[in-house]
Amino acid sequence: MHIGKSRIIAVQAPLPLGLVLGQDTTTSTPILTTIDEVSPDSNGEIAQIKQGDIVRAVTACQTTMETPTWQLLAGGIGQPKTKRFIYSVDGRPLEEVLDAVGSNRMDVGGRDVWLVLERID
């Protein structure tokens, strides 16, 4: 548990980020996802992500089937559409957080991943 000043920052970087994420499930309530390692010369280092940062949210993508009413009436199945959104990672299992980060590969626009981080000063 930390006591002191912190600040919230938002960074963007392309995949792969070159980060190792981790969680300490023994002390935190809710479970916090942290940056355990930043690879040298990685996209994460270029974006100034620091070891010890707490991950609060990331962009994620999800594919759904969009079916206009006229297509349903004609017997159609619809068309896949990828939606991008902010995913809060507080209290989420590490596997879900990793899946959320990796889902950005589905972004048809190829946009950078956004991470909302808490940095302890």
Image (spheres, grey):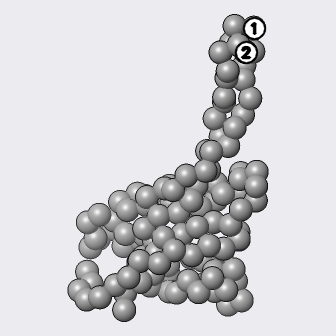
Under circle 2, the secondary element is helix
- Report if residue 76 is visible in the image: yes
Q: Viewer-proximal residue, 94 or 85?
A: 85
Quarter of image, res 8: bottom left
Three-letter amino acid code at the position of disc 2: Gln
Indicate the position of residue 30 as horizontal and vertical percent values: 29, 63
Quarter of image, res 91: bottom left
Q: Does 76 appear above or below 40?
A: above
Q: Is residue 87 left or right of residue 61?
A: left
x 45%, y 81%: residue: 53
Q: Does 36 appear above or below 100?
A: below
x 69%, y 7%: residue: 73
Q: Is residue 95 left or right of residue 112?
A: left
Q: Is residue 1 left or right of residue 7?
A: left
Q: Does 67 appear above or below 28?
A: above
Mark number displayed over residue 74? 1
Q: Does 48 appear above or below 106?
A: below
- Report if residue 39 is visible in the image: no
Indicate the position of residue 104 as horizontal and vertical percent values: 66, 57
- Residue tagged 2: 71
Report the number of numbered marks.
2
